[in-house]
Amino acid sequence: MPSMDSPNLDDVNKTVFCIPYVPRDEATGSMPKLPTSVGEDRDLDNGEELRLLAYKEAWRGCLNRMQQIIQELQNASIKAVLEEVRSSYTDILPGLPYPELPVISVINPGLGSSFLDEVSVHLESPTSSSNVQCLVAHLYPGDFPNVATGMRSIISGLMEREDMQDGGIVSSLDWRYKTKSSGIVKRKTPSSSLANYDIKFLFAWYRNRFKSSGTLISAKFTSLSHFRSGTNESSSPLLVIVLHDFEQLDPHVMQDIFYVCSGSIPALPLVFLVSMSSPASNYLNAIYSTSTVALLRVRSITVPAGNAVLQELLLKTFFDAHFEPMIMFGPAVLEFLQDYFTRYHSSTDAIITILQVAHLRHFTSDPLTLLVRDTPSADVLSKPGKYVDMDADESHPLSNVPRIIDNVNDARRAFYSRLRSLRLGFGVMICIQSFLEDGGYKGLDWSVDAKKGGLCTAMINLLKGHFTRDVKELVRYTRKLRRDELTTLSGRLHEIFSGLPPSVLSEERASLDQLARIKNSVSESGASDVPPADISASLSDWVAQYLGESLKLPEEGILWDIWYTGLAPFPSELLNPSLRASMMAGLLRPHDYVDDINANDIEPAPKEIWELPDISILFKRYLDSGKMINVYDWFESFKSVLDSQRLNVKEPASPKKRGRQKAQAPETTEDDEKWDTEVQARFIRALHELDYLGFIKHTNRKADHLLRTVFDVDDAD
Amino acid sequence: MPRPASTYTHEPEPTSEEEDIEDVDESDDSESEDLPNDATPSSRQKGKAKATYLSEESKIIVQTAFDAYFTYNKPGRAQTSSNVYSQLVVPLSAEEYADAIASSSKGVPSLEPSILRNSNLKSVFSRLMCELDEGFNIICYGLGSKRRVMNQLATSECSNRGHVVIANGFQPNFTIKDLLNSIESIPPIQDLDLPSAPVEKQTRRIHDFFAVPSQETHLYLVIHNIDAAPLRSNKAKSLLAILAHNPRIHIIASIDHINAPLLWSSSEIFSRKPSGAAIHTTPSRGFAWLWHDLTTLASYDFELTFADRSSLSGAHTGGARRKADALNAQNTATMSETAASHILASVAQKAQKLFRLLATHQLSAIESGDNNASNDLQQFGLGYDVLFDEARANFIAANETALRQLLGEFRDHNLIVSSQDSTGGGEILWIPMRKERLANVLESLAPL
């Protein structure tokens, strides 16, 4: 029986326990702070809080920047979706035999559900430029177990939205209480006698709410002549139904729902906004029957996705002259990010999460990271017994504090300026490369074009220091350019520098002037197609010199590891855990978990099987067996191990390890029976635990046989 | 026939031993050793084919799980003995099980992972709390019951910062409604005096309550075994997804099933919490999990409290599905001492005598029999004819009708079971209790 700190949690008859919050004054743990770092002994007293502040600022900057980029990325698509929704009942092809149900399938693998949220906010916002109002209901696969429930979800979803909009700014909760307390009777609609899954219920409600003055139009008898025109009924809103994770919906249910809904348009202006997570654009055609698809008017909108998104985000966040991230990530983190994005989950959520975790990791790993943004004042640093241990002379730390602060500030300035020139240098490389690509040259191995890819790898290579070849190539290319090409390229490069923010520009004034000079000399050097050698050399010389100066690794200065993660790996198990491996390790090598991680210099002696916990013994035998396990055989083998365990535990020094002879100990039969019961109980317990963990599949194929579910190999031996 | 355990334990290890086998003959030999019962020519042919297959297989340098899968799933009969556990081993009653487990603690000392030591645990907790603050939800995996550690986190850390609700998802009678009701029993929500509502509404209500910007106290939901059957359903998942996406609700959950990560799609796993939840829009859904290895190596005794220990599949689908069913099943399979004495106390004296007669016979048969007392009890049973003769001789039953009447009571309660003798010797009757239990019952039966 497990012992517990708080006894009430051990009650087997209660399924849920509730501990209400009681505010306490002395609750020291209640303040949010970062975890203690590895170098705790070097940390300041309030290091955790200071680092938390530094982290918050660094992360906020990074996050805002990324959200801005994502916003820009999705703006065009949002506009397209909004346009499509709003015009779904205005410009209809003339001459259709029956009205078609507008379905807009949004393929959004990259931007995730936040994209649809954004769309619905725009659709519902009263300040939107269009005069078409919309009511948006979000529905998920769980809402559609069958047709009746699905219809009910749609109807109640739309009606709830309307109620909420009524409430306006007042929160729905407050509104609900008000209705309750003031005893307002629920709005009586002419539809109260209809079933709540009947589309006519929705129709009656809609007519009652929005068209009470209009003529009575039954959905059934709506003829083509009643097609809405956007102008005369702009006051009644469109009913937009957003279906999330559309692929998870049952097609049999959905085809009926589409059928039902298509029967009541256009009197009921329904619009389906369908979110697809697979990039295939013809999902509807592939899964739904022709008769269903014929009822729909499908429009597909594809949202930017894939590598382009990652590339854009990384480039604009970490390699953009106009933005200075407080923390720079090393090749290890970026490589993980690229790998994870391309292999497992390509969404912006994944990118943001990975970068946030990397930030957290960085600020928890080293106490010095509290210096990221600014250096604490001398007072904080000079607290007795607490000082930041850098290269300072340890004999009199206190007197050195001001000097240390200056040093740190210098190092920070130097690091950021180095990073800035690295970014600019990379910008120049990208500029030349994209120029070469535009001109039809191959250029370097990587491409600026997201479709061909490679830009992310180029960024990683740059941080790894693998850029010498690329620079040489670029210099070679620029030397051979024709006159018009030289003009364009020097113009483009000049643009980069002239567009820099003023603070950066002051440092790069020399390059700007030189580029201007080159630009002028090209245009003044006559009209021949081949420019004079000194002019074409001047640009390539500048490229060589500039890139040589600017492309310096961030690791070169002192204290770089405060602002740069370098080769520190990303804690990938936080996002992509190897659950199986952990489980197997726990079962096969439980003793590894007991030893402290820091003290594993000596390889511990391999454990005998009897030294393992019961579940491990049983699992070892499980791995030894075939695909089916006879429970009795399993039990016998388990028993034999336990027998040897019993023997070994009783006489630890005994040289005999195997085989329990009857003559060896004068054991009473009663003991034996007790032992048998114990073995059986332990067997059942271990078996149930393995079952609980999902290692066993029960089958009726053979009496008392179990199927293995895991075929991993025991590599412990 | 039970096979000697030693051959079994040394048996398979199919490829690692055969890594350096060059010629087919040798591997053929080792194969035929593996197949002791199938010495027919056809099976030898089969063995040969298999051997060539194995020698090809031996080119594999490091065997992976995939190799193992295909090795074990290749066509052919599974090599297991024909012993049937439930026929050979009498299932333990709940009391016997509890006694046995309690006495077994003096074996090999249980292991305590280093992560559970106080200083390490403290840093783990500070990490988890920090990640919760940063808008992630935590999921803990790894071998061993994580209940204790997570409860410790809840009581020592979370309760200092906000309301805590702990849900034991592994309980067979747990429902999502319990969780929601419990959240609504937190004083500030309870004060609102909300009417009862369907779970969807309730979830929305809770979400809205914590989404209000003026709400400062956060809610920490500790869910043990979020992979348990009651929480696996689509509905429960979507409700939890709404709560998990609220910036003021934090979930710390544990999983134990090896395939638990399949519960969520990757977009659900990654979907980030909105920075400020808007109350008047449909709440977004998602989990924003961060995964932590929390291997405790502790036993799952608490989680499996309601598992039927007398059945092999008693723990399937995470704890017994239905508590009542499990208990019923237990009654039919075994007979506990208390149950037996209850039945005996309520029957007539003659019936008690009959039971005593059968029990003494069975006990002496067991004692004179082989040492594997725990095996099939039927062999120690008494033939109906013999029993009738004995009963008549002891003035228990004068005729067959009387005997049948007396037996009927016991049979109804499964205290005496019968079956046709396989050798054709008529009906065999026996008491489905192992020796020591039977002896205890007999002892407690007041001497007549």
Image (spheres, rainbow, N blue to C red):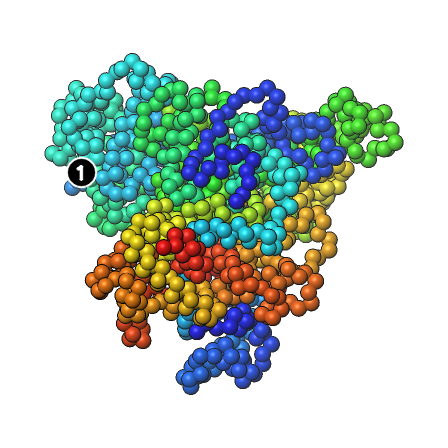
Query: In the image, is residue A281 above or below residue A606?
Result: above
Q: Residue A102: x, y in percent?
A: 26, 38
Residue A48, quarter of picture: top right
The picture places residue B371, in percent across and down from the top left corner, at 48, 69
Q: Is residue B23 above or below residue A557?
A: below
Task: Give the farthest residue toward the top.
Answer: A182
Between B132 and A292, the one nearer to me in the picture:
B132
Task: Give me the chain letter of mark 1.
Answer: A
Say how many tags the image has: 1
Whether residue A402 appears in this view of the structure is: yes
Q: State the residue at coordinates (64%, 46%).
A: B114
Q: Position of residue A323 (x, y in %)?
A: 60, 32
- The amino acid type found where label 1 is placed reads Gly
Residue furthest to the right: A395
Residue farthest to the left? Answer: A221
Q: Residue A491 occupies which quadrant of the picture?
A: top right
Q: Quadrant of the C terminus of chain A?
A: bottom right
List the residue tagged with mark 1: A263
In front of the other: B137 or A190: B137
* Residue drawn at (55%, 38%) of the image: A4
How busy is the neighbourhood of tag 1: few (under 14 within 10 Å), some, or many (20 plus)?
many
Residue A439 visible at all? no
Q: Decide if residue B35 is on the left or right side of residue A55.
A: left
Secondary element under disc 1, as helix, strand or loop, is: loop
